[in-house]
Amino acid sequence: MSNTVAQQISLFRSYILNRRLDAATLRFLDSILVSKDVKSSIEVRSSLREFMRSESLSVLREIAEKAVDQKLLVVEFLIRAFALIGDVESCLALKYEGLLLRELKSTSYQWLQVSYMEWLNFAEQSLDNGFHSIAGKGCEKALLCLQRNSMADPKTSEFFENLQAIEKIKRLKDCAIKSAASNSGANHGVLEK
């Protein structure tokens, strides 16, 4: 690793330690990761992943008493940072927690309501990345959203669209359950595969 890259990584770490959790920090991280010296460096990505995992826990503890919108901004920053680093497990774990937080707070703040499509997208991403049991939970949440909001007249196209969505979610859930059963007994960190 070149001296320049080491300095850039040190600067990125200082941004995080000083809680500069914004788009500029994400752009800076991206510029580090696309540099020729870092692109293929497993060591650098691993180091950044461990640093971000450690700091994200501290950050989440620090924001526990903050307003929901502030929490969601921080969670979104962390999701994007983990996505850039290539830490799918942490990215999906935070995405799940963010969706749960929104769902919990949506009773007081309507604008936070999670759609079935958001849960479905989460479930698909989880399944695609081998996190079968959490994909099943995402499917369950998607089905609950559809059932909770299913007031469509049986003669409308919305009703048939909802039926198609329910069938798609059930197929995905079945796939997730079968995959989880075939991989049972293995625990792979934050999310179960």
Image (tube, rainbow, N blue to C red):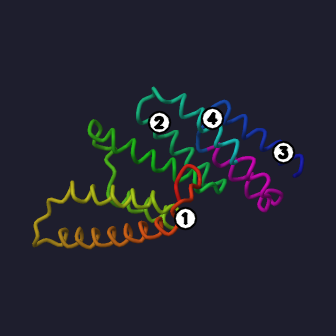
Identify which residue, 47 or 7, lies in the foreground: 47
- Say which element carries label 2: helix
- Marks 1/2 in contact by CB < 8 Å: the verdict is no
- Marks 3/2 in contact by CB < 8 Å: the verdict is no
Q: Which mark is residue 6?
A: 3
**Furthest residue in direction right, as rendered:** 3
Tell me which amino acid carries mark 2.
Lys
Tell me the residue that label 1 is attached to: 129
State which quadrant residue 87 falls in.
bottom right
Q: Which residues are magenta?
A: 24-48
Q: Is residue 39 left or right of residue 108?
A: right
Tell me the residue that label 2 is attached to: 71
Query: Residue at (44%, 45%) from the top-left corner?
Result: 98
Tell me which amino acid carries mark 4.
Arg
- Say which element carries label 3: helix
In space, the residues marked 3 and 2 are separated at their CA atoms by 30 Å
Tell me which amino acid carries mark 3.
Ala
Mark found first going from the N terminus, 3 or 4: 3
Query: Residue at (46%, 66%) from the top-left corner?
Result: 181
- Say which element carries label 1: loop
In space, the residues marked 1 and 2 are separated at their CA atoms by 26 Å
- Say which element carries label 4: loop
